[in-house]
Image (spheres, coloured by chain):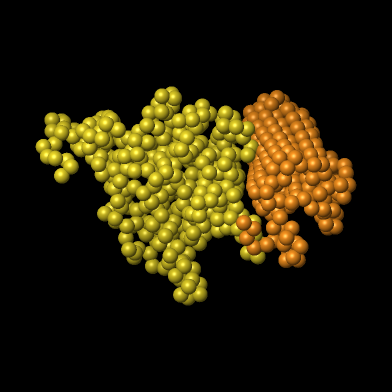
Amino acid sequence: MKLGVHAGIGIESMNERLEKICFLPPAIDTPWVGAPTGGGPIQIKRTDGKQVSLKLPLFWYDPPWSEVEIESADAIAAAVARLGVTVSALRSDLSSGDDLPELHQFSSDGTTGEQVENAEYLPRMVPYRPERYGLSERDFDGAAVVDVRLAMRRNLTGRFAFTPEEIGRWEATQADSPLAGGGWVPAASFPPDVDGVENLAGKFNQLRLLAGDAAVFVSIAPHRLNEELPAVLKNQPEGIILRLNELNLSALELAHCVKQTRGMMDEQQSGHVPLWVVPGNISADDAVKLIALGANAVAIDSWCQELISEVRDAQQNAASNSGYSSLSGPKTQDWVEWVEYELFRHIERFDGLMHAMQYQAPDERLATLSTEWASMLSIPNLNVPFNSSS
Amino acid sequence: MNQTPNINPALHGLSLDLGVSELHQAIHEIPIGDDDEQLTQVEVTGSAGQDAVLMRLDHLIRIKMEGPLGDYAFAFNKQADIRMTGDVGNGVAEGMVSGAVRVRGDAGVGAGAAMTGGTLAIYGNAGNRCGAAMRGGGIFVRGDVGDETGVGALGGMIVVGGDAGHNLGDAMSNATVFIRGAAASLADGVADAPLRKREQLRLGLLLINASIRGDAKEFRRIVPVAMLEAEANERGELNPNWR
């Protein structure tokens, strides 16, 4: 496989959803000062006082690892994490048997994990699904975030289920005796060892002990937010992940939902709890705007999906054209360069806008030409000398 | 000075008052003997219903303790042979990989959830969702189990000496439940069937190993209908695509 040659996913090809919102530049009488600081690593505070530090407020929430060969999955995961993006993966997503995935090579806890000399820290999330298929105790070592997933998972057919490919990757059964006869396997709704939402705090405490350096987050769907968010917050998670991609939201609804959720959390005395959002397709500009509206980190699955799709298609073509041709050949550096090439423009744009936003106070960063958007989002309605509808 | 700890293993004493991580470390610092038949023993005192006790043990050692304990005791156990008297809370031996946990008392919900190996024996009753999402290993419950036992189990075996609640075997794949009493209801897609000869033999040995009295002939098995059909068609124990 030749890396670095592809159709390209330039910034221009990423549709901007929140184009009705603009970034407010500083007013003309703003004194010239040095470039503002801030926008550096984000800090998450665990309930025991430990700090979790992440380079960027970007994460890859739900990578479809089973769509590509396992070696390719590991290489892509590590290369994306090297850019500072927190990547969600189990060991069994990225390696078979006792092999140590590249993404998992760093462990900050030498007593329980495996430590590889000079390994670079790669930010990683543990997807802690209720049924825990594929999870091993070693997944907790060196993780930055444990994501307790309380929203049921739909597969591409619309079922609340896992595909045979996912189950096969996680459980690695023999080819002639697949689990469930090779059919789909139902997904769980709630951790079977927790006796109700009101008792989630005990599960979170357990996970804090198992993953001594990780923040424990909970991901929920937005459908019953008014009831479920307060119930979850009472159990004191260290962060909330809101899966807004579960709804087909308009741009305004997406922005409003983020703003409202942040407000709800503030009202629940959870203003200090990070809100991470999974918005679906977004541009770099959208990601920054969502942060300005109240999110603390944004999922960039739509950017990273291009990587998976490209490798998957190439692997399928290679298999059909030549019988079989493994694409796991490229060396780590090749993968890093390819992923950087694919993602760098997005991340650089995101980083630049995040930096520029620091010039303004938090409530003076966004504005809009639309009275409707201004009203819904409580942001300034720009007074410009032209008809904004023309 | 030559010592032979494997012949006369010392009984070590430790207390939960040490703190969770300190106790974990202290146990792992105890040298293990050379004789698998006679494990080094540790007696752990100070149990008073604490949560998340002795998780992630990975040491070939026998631990004795008196309960009660709270939730998630012995989660992700590897190698250790744990024998405790008293009740445990929810999620006992969650994610156990190997070794054995024997509880002479009752267990809460989700006992042995997501286990991948080893043996969990509960000599009292277990709550709802016992063996949920287990992927291997064996669970023995001398008494009754609650609703949704074995829900989502992909592999392994659950032996119930008493009765079961509703929806026994829901969404189960390659797992088998053996039950002596009655189930309030079976889940869709699973069926009640007599034991085959080889299963009687296997279960008999497992009952002896788990110190559970009874004849394997008294048990019936609860398995996915697709698995039964595959057996009937003599196509092995698995059938392509059950759903």
Whether residue A171 is visible to the viewer of this picture, yes or no, is yes
Among the chains pictured, the one given yellow colouring is A
Judged left or right of residue B153, residue A371 is left
Whether residue B16 is visible to the viewer of this picture, yes or no, is no
Taking depth in this image into account, of A174 and B172 the one nearest to the observer is B172
Taking depth in this image into account, of A42 and B11 the one nearest to the observer is A42
Q: Quadrant of the C terminus of chain A?
A: top left
| x and y percentages locating residue B152 in the rendered image | 64, 47
Judged left or right of residue A23, residue A246 is right
Residue plotted at (23% across, 40% down)? A22
Among the chains pictured, the one given orange colouring is B
Q: Is residue A372 above or below residue B159?
A: above
Identify the image quadrant of residue A99: bottom right
Q: Quadrant of the N terminus of chain A?
A: bottom left
Taking depth in this image into account, of B115 and A114 the one nearest to the observer is B115
Residue plotted at (84% across, 42% down)? B212
Residue plotted at (42% across, 43% down)? A247
| x and y percentages locating residue B242 in the rendered image | 64, 58
